[in-house]
Image (tube, rainbow, N blue to C red):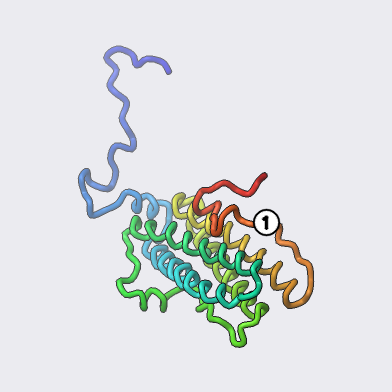
Amino acid sequence: MAARPKGASAPTKPHATGKTKPGDTSERVGVVELEKRGVNVKDLVEKLIDAAGAEFTTYYYYTILRMYLAGHEDYKEICEDARLEDRAHFELITPRIYELGGSIPRDIRDFADRAGCPDAYLPNPPTAAAILTVLLEAERCAIRTWSEICDLTIGKDFRTYDMASRILQEETEHEAWFIELLSKERDNKIVPSGHFRRGTPGDAPYSKNRGFYNP
Ligand SMILES: [Fe+2]
Ligand SMILES: [Fe+2]
């Protein structure tokens, strides 16, 4: 870089100030910049709370579903990965809600009620095929949810997009796993998902920034 000629005034720092007054804690530049780029932050926060609610309730319901996969150790293990990864999704996205000025509901009942996906209830009778169908449809709801968040944030809210896209990648894997298992269990059909086991249960390589299975 060429040296500044003697006597020349210092270049201005274009980002030193902006709309938010110095020291003002009532406004977040991290939000102002999103609004400048066309993000409706209020709406986004509401969608993130619904999405976080779905991750949290799914974590709960998958606990029951995993228990009732009794006798199918392979299904149990994969259900456990999906269960723990949903908890990782809740943990990843919840701080973002607060950064954007939002909050999860004070009452867990409100949180469960507004979850963006249906309750993943234990089917009756709790056959493996019926449980795998519930798991598959829960993953599909999650893919739709996180795809929408990606659409709303791509090229505008880089941080939420990064988180949502990591979650979406795991949800996409989860759908493929349950298609493989349900096809075999219900239809005796072979539909490979490309899956091999996580290193440890619920490894969450994308949402926890862990290594991928790539031997
Ligand atoms: Fe999830
Ligand atoms: Fe999932």
- Left or right: 23 as drawn, with respect to 85: left
Determine the residue positioned at 51% across, 72% down. Answer: 63
Which quadrant would residue 139 be assigned to in this image?
Answer: bottom right
Label 1 element class: loop
Q: Compared to 204, does 188 lie above or below?
A: below
Closest to the observer, 69 or 8: 69
Residue labelled with disc 1 = 196
Q: Residue 214, position in %: x, y?
A: 65, 46
Determine the residue positioned at 64% across, 80% down. Answer: 130
Q: Residue 64, position in %: x, y?
A: 52, 76
Determine the residue positioned at 69% across, 69% down. Answer: 179
The residue lying furthest to the front in this view is 71
Q: Residue 88, position in %: x, y?
A: 47, 59
Circle count: 1
The residue lying furthest to the right in this view is 189
- Left or right: 192 as drawn, with respect to 105: right
- Left or right: 119 as drawn, with respect to 186: left
Q: Quadrant of the N terminus?
A: top left
Determine the residue positioned at 53% across, 54% down. Answer: 166
Closest to the observer, 33 or 99: 99
Amino acid type of the residue that numbered disc 1 sits on in the rendered structure? Phe
Which quadrant would residue 15 be assigned to in this image?
Answer: top left
The residue lying furthest to the left in this view is 23
Estimate how packed mark 1 is, as few (under 14), some (14 to 19) or many (20 or more) residues with alpha carbons within 10 Å: few
